[in-house]
Image (cartoon, rainbow, N blue to C red):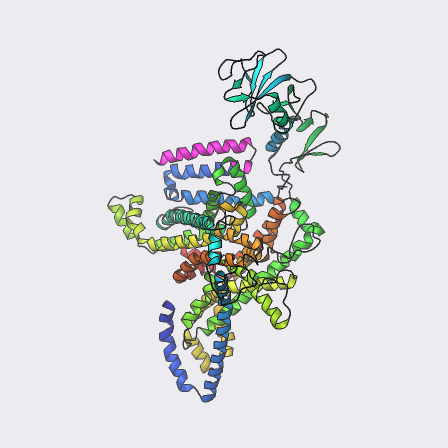
């Protein structure tokens, strides 16, 4: 049973690897090869029996967690973008699909047929009088009227029908000639046949021919030679013209170079970077501050209904985040939102929650406070319980008042307990894309930037813009270069967290 | 529950001790503090609950417009719900079904896959075990949101060969969610498996049962609580996820609920406010109910490092 499944997986993998290699998708081919090897080794080698239990988990982690990380790093060093989506092999193949009508090519007389589904076929007769059946995407078939699927011939030697396709008369053909028949390519690419005039059809030839030896493409019409420029991912003619589509190439540190050295790109990046830090920091401080304050109130056992109140205060946390943000987005709505319209009524003014750079940021922090304080309250309540009470009694005996006790005892002990969580919260907010995007999609826009950026964009939403919303075409390579910057920051913070908070030891003990 | 049990025995003697010590000035100070606490509580409750109350009010407002909403609608109606259910451009029930399907399949697969892995980590001793465990945790330092561009390109490429796993498919989305559900859940489950005595497996082995038999017959029934917790966490997390669904799904019919609700914001939010409110209300109920019921479990899971998204 196990071997049977393994066999099916292997067969499928070999098929996939073949396809990926054929299209020059080396990263994917390597991924599938490696994953399949891992699966085979752990399932066949008796010594690795324990890993057999982990087969699905390891495969999922390799494919959907590890590979995307490695692929992010890889594309950061390529020119992967709109215009460079294909591999070189695919690009050559795509360019090779272009055709042209050569002077003095094979000329056929033609008759058109239509199937009940609206598809077309041609009956072609060449200069020697041989007949052929031509259909789109299918090889040209020599045929004789009256044989097989081809209907009997009329007095001109032309069949009345072909395989259920019905012959079209001249009055039927004329209105659809230019609009429907002329654009069709009959026969198998690249050797296709198109209708040239009301009488003639001609064989088309591939316009661009690739020569592997010189790594160049020759235009058969003009004779211009386009040579591969593997540093830019284009085939380029001597006078600088490029053949579209371009292909992916690795460009070394090019994306990082642009990021650091191009003033037009660096400007918004630095602005976004600073706001990312400010946003994450403020979010942690404000949610922790409010959460701790409320936790202290309800830590007082003489406070009535404290359990009920705490449960009510947790509700924002239970609402799906996006829904919560969108509710706020409605309440802050410039013209009709409840907050804006009541502010206008009361003080005659309401800030531009979505249009003003500063107030947009304030609005986001407010919404994030609403989303985040219940979590901090829960965490702080738990941590407060764990502080032994006799410390306070000892402090009281020594004459410490409650203000002093808070700063000298509660806060330090609490920070030790929740410190790692605060750092985790910082990292989380550093990448808190959902809040930024659902609040205002990073707007208002920063004027006059080379790439689109908004005042409330954080790094992760900025990469999203570059990859998916750029007006000048997506630039995946550049977006992933910024992702690498985020990777490094997140890794550094996490390292700090593990080093200084002792989480690392805790994990090691648990293992 | 548990928190009260801890708090009471410590707190009571202290309160009594304080009561005997208190002078009248201290009593006054306490009163001031209590008033401050009550005022803070009122503000906190207003801040936390007003948006919820307002969206409920909007949902039952007879008109969908934001401008005409009052806190208590004079003639409350369910018109917004009727409109929500009958809008062909915003197929609400289809989105609910998509979300339930994606989250349900993700949760079931996540439980099954992490269960097997956690069992192996808990019961077998083999070389590289520790480093593998730590590696699995460390990879999760980079949440999959960070690799969304790579995931997008990956699914687009896969989709050309394997359409049911490509962009704009639930298959692809489920696999991406599944990847994110591995690390922390393997750890969570392994911890629970570790708490079950190994004698149980060993006695089964003595009786000649294979690991697989011992697992299904003896261990599986014992770990069902943690399976439920992991399943519920995976379900709620997936159900609430928004960004990846928005990046990886393209057409309205494929959208999950969160991606779908966002459409109301794109188009004339002030006019479709009431309909959005009705949708938000229904959409929030499953996750909110689960959170409230399983509060304690979720909080303990969260304090181990994961933060809600």
Give the left or right position of residue B195, taking residue B265 as reference: left
Give the left or right position of residue A316, taking residue A156 as reference: left
Give the left or right position of residue A504, taking residue A96 as reference: left
Can see residue A494?
A: yes
**Quarter placement of the C terminus of chain A:** bottom left
A77 and A511: which is toward the camera: A77
Establish if A73 lies above or below A183: below
* Residue A500 percent coordinates (x, y): 51, 61
Magenta stretch in the rendered image: A1-29
Establish if A92 lies above or below B255: above
* Residue A145 percent coordinates (x, y): 53, 13
Is residue B274 part of the magenta span, yes or no? Answer: no
Q: Residue furthest left?
A: B207
- Residue found 53% across the figure and 42% down from its top: B154
A441 and A42: which is toward the camera: A441
* Residue A363 percent coordinates (x, y): 59, 63
- Residue found 50% across the figure and 20% down from its top: A163
Helix, strand or loop for the magenta stretch, by majority: helix
Q: Residue furthest front?
A: A171
* Residue B90 percent coordinates (x, y): 51, 50
Establish if A511 lies above or below A225: below
Q: Residue furthest right?
A: A239
B220 and B74: which is toward the camera: B74
Give the left or right position of residue A120, taking residue B123 as reference: right
Q: Residue furthest bottom?
A: B24
**Quarter placement of the N terminus of chain A:** top left
A131 and A207: which is toward the camera: A131
């Amino acid at each position: 049973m196990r071997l049977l499944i393994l066999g099916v997986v292997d067969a499928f993998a070999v098929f996939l690897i073949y396809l990926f290699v054929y299209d020059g998708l080396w990263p994917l081919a390597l991924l599938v090869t490696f994953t399949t090897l891992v699966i085979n080794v752990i399932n066949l080698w008796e010594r690795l029996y324990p890993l057999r239990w982990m087969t699905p988990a390891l495969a999922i982690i390799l494919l959907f967690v590890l590979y995307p990380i490695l692929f992010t790093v890889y594309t950061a060093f390529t020119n992967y973008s709109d215009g460079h989506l294909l591999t070189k092999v695919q690009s050559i193949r795509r360019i090779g699909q272009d055709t042209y009508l050569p002077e003095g090519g094979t000329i056929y007389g033609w008759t058109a047929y239509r199937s009940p589904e609206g598809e077309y076929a041609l009956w072609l007769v060449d200069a020697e009088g041989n007949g052929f059946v031509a259909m789109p995407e299918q090889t040209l078939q020599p045929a004789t009227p009256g044989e097989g699927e081809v209907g009997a011939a009329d007095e001109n030697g032309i069949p009345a029908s072909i395989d259920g396709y019905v012959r079209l008369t001249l009055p039927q053909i004329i209105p659809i000639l230019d609009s429907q028949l002329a654009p069709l390519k009959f026969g198998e690419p690249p050797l296709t046949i198109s209708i040239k005039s009301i009488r003639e059809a001609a064989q088309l030839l591939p316009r661009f021919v690739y020569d592997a030896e010189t790594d160049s493409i020759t235009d058969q019409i003009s004779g211009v030679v386009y040579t591969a420029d593997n540093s830019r991912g284009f085939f380029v003619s001597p006078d600088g013209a490029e053949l579209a589509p371009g292909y992916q190439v690795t460009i070394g540190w090019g994306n990082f170079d642009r990021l650091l050295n191009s003033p037009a790109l660096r400007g918004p990046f630095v602005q976004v970077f600073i706001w990312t830090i400010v946003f994450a920091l403020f979010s942690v401080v404000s949610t922790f501050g409010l959460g701790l304050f409320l936790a202290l109130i309800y830590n007082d056992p003489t406070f009535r209904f404290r359990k009920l109140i705490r449960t009510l205060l947790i509700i924002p946390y239970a609402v799906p985040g996006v829904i919560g943000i969108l509710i706020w987005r409605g309440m802050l709505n410039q013209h009709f939102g409840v907050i804006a319209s009541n502010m206008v009524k009361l003080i005659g003014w309401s800030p531009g929650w979505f249009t003003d750079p500063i107030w947009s940021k304030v609005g986001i922090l407010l919404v994030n406070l609403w989303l985040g304080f219940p979590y901090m309250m829960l965490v702080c309540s738990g941590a407060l319980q764990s502080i032994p009470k006799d410390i306070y009694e000892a402090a009281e005996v020594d004459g410490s008042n409650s203000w002093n006790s808070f700063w000298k005892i509660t806060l330090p002990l609490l920070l030790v307990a929740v410190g790692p969580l605060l750092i985790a919260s910082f990292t989380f907010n550093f990448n808190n894309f959902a809040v930024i995007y659902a609040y205002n999609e990073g707007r208002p826009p920063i004027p006059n930037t080379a790439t689109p950026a908004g005042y409330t964009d954080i790094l992760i939403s900025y990469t999203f813009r570059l990859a998916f919303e750029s007006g000048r075409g997506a630039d995946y390579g550049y977006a992933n270069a910024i992702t690498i910057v985020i990777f490094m920051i997140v890794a550094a913070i996490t390292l700090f967290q593990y080093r200084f908070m002792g989480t690392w030891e805790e994990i090691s003990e648990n293992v | 529950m548990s928190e009260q049990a801890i708090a009471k025995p410590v707190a009571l003697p202290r309160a009594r001790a304080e009561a005997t010590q208190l002078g009248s000035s201290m009593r006054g100070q306490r009163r001031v503090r209590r008033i401050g606490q009550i005022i803070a509580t009122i503000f906190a409750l207003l801040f936390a609950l007003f948006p919820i109350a307002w969206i409920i009010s909007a949902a039952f407002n007879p008109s969908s417009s934001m401008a005409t909403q009052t806190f208590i609608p004079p003639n409350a109606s369910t018109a917004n719900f009727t409109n929500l259910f009958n809008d062909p451009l915003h197929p609400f029930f289809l989105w609910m079904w998509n979300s339930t399907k994606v989250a349900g399949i993700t949760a079931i697969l996540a439980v099954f896959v992490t269960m097997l892995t956690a069992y192996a980590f808990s019961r077998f001793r083999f070389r590289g075990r520790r480093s593998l465990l730590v590696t699995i945790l460390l990879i999760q330092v980079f949440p999959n949101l960070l690799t969304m561009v790579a995931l997008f390109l990956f699914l687009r490429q896969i989709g050309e060969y394997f359409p049911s796993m490509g962009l704009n498919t639930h298959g692809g989305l489920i696999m991406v969610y599944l990847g994110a559900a591995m690390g922390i859940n393997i750890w969570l489950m392994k911890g629970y498996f570790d708490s079950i005595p190994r004698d149980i497996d060993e006695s089964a082995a003595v009786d000649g049962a294979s690991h697989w038999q011992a697992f299904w017959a003896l261990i599986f029934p014992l770990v069902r609580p943690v399976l439920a917790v992991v399943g519920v966490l995976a379900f709620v997390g997936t159900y609430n996820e928004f960004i990846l669904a928005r990046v990886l799904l393209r057409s309205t019919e494929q959208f999950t609920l969160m991606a779908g609700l966002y459409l109301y914001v794109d188009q004339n939010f002030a006019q479709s406010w009431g309909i959005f409110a009705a949708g938000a209300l229904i959409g929030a109920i499953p996750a909110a109910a689960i959170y409230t019921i399983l509060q304690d479990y979720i909080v303990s899971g969260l304090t181990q490092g994961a933060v809600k998204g």
